[in-house]
Amino acid sequence: MELIQSFSVDHTRIVPGIFFSRQDKVGGGYVTTYDIRLKRPNREPVIDVAAMHSLEHIIATTLRNDPEWKDEVVYWGPMGCLTGFYLILKGDRQPRDIYDIVLKGFRSVADADEVPGATAVNCGYYRMHNLDLAKYYAAEFVKYLTDNKDDPEIYEYPRSERLVTDDGRSFYDS
């Protein structure tokens, strides 16, 4: 069975950043999935689950209310490995093109007095939020993005090499 595209990324070398993950043709246009990576996989502790949940609510609300971007946002949600988020947008943009909106989303966490939609009526597990810790992670990522804005490493995935065995079988070495 072929490995999916996201497993071709060398997770031993990836750094926090904004990465192009995949693009799919839908109707007459495209939807593009971006990897918004906050932590170095397998080298740093993952994001606390309650804080991740709060980041999801706050940033999704910010993105979906932004006048320029609200009609472009298809999805904002956490990675299962708890090292970052996936952002799916309509259209065809490079990671550098979405830097400002990603930064805006994470900066909005600092101004949050409460987690939007954190009620029994609006959320599947409304008791699992940690706004203070979400603010910590958001501030950490904002500083990192700001300090590294011009570093190409935060926009380009390190790819693992695709190996082919003598008998023609392909696999990813990552």
Image (tube, rainbow, N blue to C red):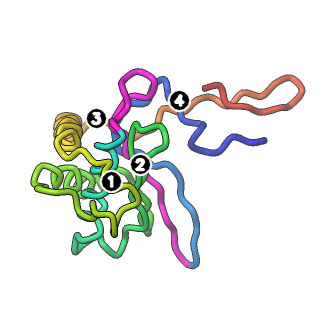
* Label 2 sits on residue: 78
Foreground: 154 or 126? 126
Distance in Å between CA atoms under marks 2 and 1: 7 Å
Distance in Å between CA atoms under marks 4 and 3: 18 Å
Q: Amino acid at mark 4?
A: Asp
Closer to the N terminus: mark 1 or mark 3? 1
Q: Amino acid at mark 1?
A: Glu
Q: Are marks 2 and 1 in contact (CB under 8 Å)?
A: yes
Q: Magenta region: which residues?
A: 28-48
Q: Give the label on residue 56, or none.
A: 1
Closer to the N terminus: mark 2 or mark 1? 1
Q: Amino acid at mark 3?
A: Asp
- Estimate how packed mark 3 is, as few (under 14), some (14 to 19) or many (20 or more) residues with alpha carbons within 10 Å: few
Foreground: 65 or 89? 65
Foreground: 5 or 64? 64
Res. 122 image quadrant: bottom left
Could you tell me which secondary element the residue under label 2 belongs to? Answer: strand
* Label 4 sits on residue: 10
Closer to the N terminus: mark 1 or mark 4? 4
